[in-house]
């Protein structure tokens, strides 16, 4: 397990050094790593071997944040979420999702529909219970099974504009309203990943790293050869002082490194391909979600299967199938049935190393319940990152529905939200250290 973390860690060190001046380095080892990375970039450009600027992270946790399966928004069971589909995992630490007001209103109701949900992994709770740094590579890799379980809790404010001819109660307009829309509810959920093939530290992904492990050994041999030749020709570098690093002839150093740099280029290519192969893997989870109301509303329960499949490095497909039960209490007959949903998520940002890319999603679902007509929805969503080092994204969606829960007429609405993933922010900060 440590070998996989070491591989991605080496690549992050190399790429950070590409943008730095090596002379200010404070130790010989750090200076040499920076120089190797510098010459590696020069050789790669000449050979045109690297077509992208992928930057695998120093830690497996950072690579996992880019695997395309972590759900950052409120569950699809929430009445005003910006997502119609649930993905198979969530933040390795804690994420916060706010579903803001609709961008459009109706004359029959208000626009006060803000909701909030918090999702945490069992791993983050386990790390806290052990007073252990959750970003510690060995601890993170060793406790992979704790990252299979996710818990969600939040407050859901329903769509108060959904009138119903079959409901009870009225607003000031006298229009009969859906009893489910009369008050806020509690969102609760649990998700368990049965098949976590997108996790870098999974044993199932060892095959993708076998070649990289061999290549890492070759790179280590070449690094030792570089150090040996530098010892022979530039012995003064062993003084390990800043004043000496800027006094040696650059051409001599470059010539020594260039003789051995190919193994480092190959290593970067192999590990980048391994990360890409992992992103193509399939992942499967099961979940339970509840939207619980007081005496003035329905209770909604959903048992769901969730599936993710990386169709390409930039396209992910998600599918959901669920069994739903609506406890109508005293408002009428209970509703039972099912739901099927699918989503294609396209990564607009070409750089696969970017932790917070622009995403474009196309999704749709059908819901079939007893005592009510089927409902069909389609959605177009744009996920906008708020910078690259914040962990914050802004999802904005436009949704068309064939009808509301109880009204036989189609409608279109736009929503926007706010989500914060502490795992992404923590990984970005650690990578800088």
Image (cartoon, grey):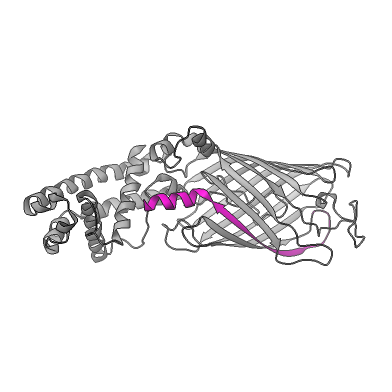
Instruction: Residue 26 in the image: state x and y as whole percent.
Output: 23, 53
Name the one closer to the observer, 326 or 122. Answer: 122
Q: What residue sits 34% from the left and 63% below the top?
A: 51
Name the one closer to the observer, 198 or 42. Answer: 42
376 lies above or below 122: below
428 lies above or below 125: below
Quick check: is 423 in the magenta stretch?
Answer: yes
Location of the N terminus by quadrant is top left
Quick check: is 411 in the magenta stretch?
Answer: yes
Going by the image, does 268 lie left or right of 194? left
* Residue 296 visible in image: yes
Residue 108 figure quarter: bottom right
Q: Residue furthest top?
A: 130
Instruction: Residue 354 in the image: state x and y as whole percent.
Output: 44, 58
Going by the image, does 221 lie left or right of 113? left
Q: What residue sits 67% from the left and 49% below the top?
A: 340
Name the one closer to the observer, 101 or 408. Answer: 101
Residue 132 figure quarter: top left
| Span highlighted in magenta in the image | 405-433
295 lies above or below 230: above
Q: How many marks?
A: 0
Instruction: Residue 151 in the image: state x and y as whole percent.
Output: 61, 40
Q: What residue sits 90% from the left and 51% below the top?
A: 168
* Residue 75 visible in image: no
326 lies above or below 413: above
Instruction: Residue 196 in the image: state x and y as whole percent.
Output: 50, 40
Q: Residue furthest right?
A: 174
Name the one closer to the observer, 28 or 121. Answer: 28
């Amino acid at each position: 397990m440590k070998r996989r973390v070491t591989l991605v860690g080496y690549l992050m060190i190399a790429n950070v050094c590409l943008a730095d001046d090596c002379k200010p380095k404070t130790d010989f080892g750090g200076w040499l790593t920076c120089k190797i990375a510098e010459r590696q970039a020069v050789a790669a450009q000449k050979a045109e071997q690297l077509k992208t600027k992928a930057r695998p992270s120093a830690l497996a946790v950072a690579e996992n944040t880019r695997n395309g399966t972590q759900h950052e928004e409120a569950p699809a069971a929430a009445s005003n979420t910006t997502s119609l589909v649930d993905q198979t995992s969530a933040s390795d630490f804690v994420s916060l999702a706010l579903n803001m007001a609709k961008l459009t209103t109706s004359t029959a109701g208000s626009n006060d529909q803000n909701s909030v949900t918090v999702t945490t992994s069992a791993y983050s709770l386990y790390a806290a219970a052990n007073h252990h740094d959750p970003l510690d590579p060995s601890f993170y890799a060793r406790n992979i099974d704790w990252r299979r379980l996710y818990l969600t809790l939040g407050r859901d404010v329903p769509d108060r504009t959904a009138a119903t001819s079959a409901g009870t109660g009225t607003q000031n307009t006298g229009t009969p309203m859906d009893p489910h829309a009369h008050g806020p509810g509690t969102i609760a959920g649990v998700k368990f990943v049965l098949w976590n093939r997108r996790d870098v530290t999974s044993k199932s992904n060892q095959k993708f790293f076998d070649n990289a492990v061999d290549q890492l050994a070759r790179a280590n041999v070449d690094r030792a050869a570089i150090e040996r030749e530098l010892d022979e020709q530039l012995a003064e570098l062993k003084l390990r002082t800043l004043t000496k690093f800027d006094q040696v002839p650059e051409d001599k150093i470059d010539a020594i490194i260039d003789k051995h740099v190919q193994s480092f280029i190959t290593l970067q290519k192999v590990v980048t391909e391994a990360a890409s192969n992992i992103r193509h893997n399939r992942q499967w989870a099961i979940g339970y979600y509840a939207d619980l109301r007081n005496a003035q509303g329905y209770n909604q329960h959903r048992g769901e299967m969730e599936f993710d499949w990386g169709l390409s490095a930039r396209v992910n497909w998600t599918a959901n199938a669920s069994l739903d039960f609506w406890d109508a209490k005293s408002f009428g007959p209970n509703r039972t049935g099912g739901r099927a949903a699918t989503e294609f998520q396209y990564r607009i940002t070409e750089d696969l190393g970017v932790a917070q890319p622009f995403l474009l999603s196309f999704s749709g679902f059908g819901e079939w319940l007893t005592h009510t007509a089927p409902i069909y929805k389609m959605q177009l969503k744009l996920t906008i990152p708020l910078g690259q080092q914040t962990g914050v994204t802004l999802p904005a969606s436009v949704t068309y529905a064939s009808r509301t829960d109880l009204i036989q007429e189609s409608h279109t609405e736009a929503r926007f939200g706010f989500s914060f993933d502490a795992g992404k922010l923590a990984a970005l900060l650690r990578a800088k250290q």
